[in-house]
Amino acid sequence: MGIDDMCSTGLVLSLGLETPSKIEAQRQAKQGLDLEPSLTLCLSGANRATCDERPPADHLYCQASPHSHNSLSAVSSFSSPRVKRERDLSSEEAEVETTRVSSKASDEDDDGANARKKLRLTKEQSALLEESFKQHSTLNPKQKQALARQLNLRPRQVEVWFQNRRARTKLKQTEVDCEILKKCCETLTDENRRLQKELQDLKALKLAQPFYMHMPAATLTMCPSCERIGAGPSVDGATPTKSPFSMGAKSHLYSHHFTNPSAAC
DNA sequence: GACGTCAATAGGAGGT
DNA sequence: ACCTCCTATTGACGTC
């Protein structure tokens, strides 16, 4: 029984994981609320290990490392001509200077100013950013500036860190939701399989015993001890019909109705 | 060398 | 027009 079969039963898989609109998500984020991420069931990446909380084990580079400089030089060389980026750079120039360690500027720029080197945040910087993220998943400009000063980073770097952090959080939550949905799907599949089997049994029973199955359900009774079926009490109070047959299969569908043993017992 | 991580970029959407 | 945010992607770097 596959997914198609499930679909044909009209079953609907719903966990009630409402996806907030983008605007709503942003609003919630601004309010510092935990927001439900949009739920995208993508099995291809479902098993990707989550690394969100993993503390970087390789903080070998501090802000004063040569890589820091290279990252910054890359920013200027890779920046688009967009107004915003230019504004960012111009307004952050002072902080660029504070972050930049230019001792190796010349020798590494020689072979290509476009080379983008990777900046590694220090443990202290990461810890402070994490702490701040716990309080607010988004930052207003003042908070961003203050945090950047505190971390000796450019505001743009703080902003990027928060963006990436939100993305990782969302990815992690999506993976969790995916696992929940998979479990739910398995449960529903099992339930559907069981119900299909029960339906088949009932159909087989109907073919074998058309007499009983054609009678209104309310008129049938089955003795809970011997499982013999008999018609319910007649309207005129006559003795219920004794049955020569017995139910071949127990079904919980009937179990609620046979409270009275048949007269056959 | 494949792979994972993550800082950074690009581009689009929506709000003001 | 400009801003912030999201998403996809890139590229450097570390690890196995």
Image (cartoon, coloured by chain):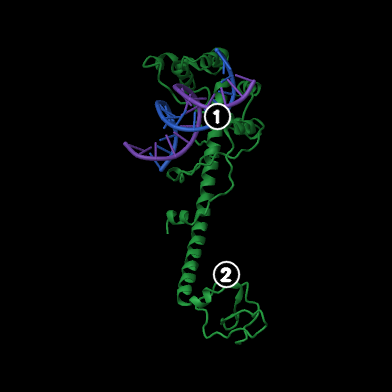
Chain colours: A green, B purple, C blue
Residue at the image point whose x is 67% and y is 81% from the top:
A236
For mark 1, what is the residue? A163
Q: Secondary structure at mark 1?
A: helix
Name above or below for residue A141 compared with residue A124: above
Left or right of residue A227, residue C10 in this image? left
- How would you rate the neighbour count of disc 2 (Cα within 10 Å): few for under 14, some for 14-19, many for 20 or more? few
Q: Identify which amino acid the numbered label 1 is placed on.
A: Gln
Residue under numbered circle 2? A253
Q: Quadrant of residue A112?
A: top left
Identify the residue at horizontal 46%, vertical 26% (top origin). A118
Q: Nearer the viewer, residue A108 or A94?
A: A94
Q: Earlier in the sequence, mark 2 or mark 1?
A: 1
**Residue A105 falls left or right of residue A24:** left
Q: Nearer the viewer, residue A40 or A233?
A: A233
User: In 3D space, how far apart are the residues under numbered discs 2 and 1 (Cα atoms)?
Assistant: 54 Å
**Is the Cβ of the residue at disc 2 closer than 8 Å to that at disc 1?**
no
The answer to whether A189 is drawn above or below residue A265 in the figure is above
SS of the residue at dot 2? loop
Quadrant assignment for the N terminus of chain A: bottom left
Position of residue A153 in the picture relative to residue A118 (left or right)? right
The picture places residue A197, in percent across and down from the top left corner, at: 47, 67
The C terminus of chain A sits in image quarter: bottom right
Q: Position of residue A214 (x, y in %)?
A: 52, 73
Q: Residue reaching furthest front? A: A236
Using the image as rendered, state which of residue C11 and residue A64 is in the foreground: C11
* Residue shown at the point (64%, 31%) measured from the top left: A27
Q: Is residue A93 visible?
A: no
Q: Chain of mark 2?
A: A
Q: Are marks 2 and 1 on the same chain?
A: yes
The answer, for residue A78, to whether it is visible in the render is yes
Tag 1 subunit: A
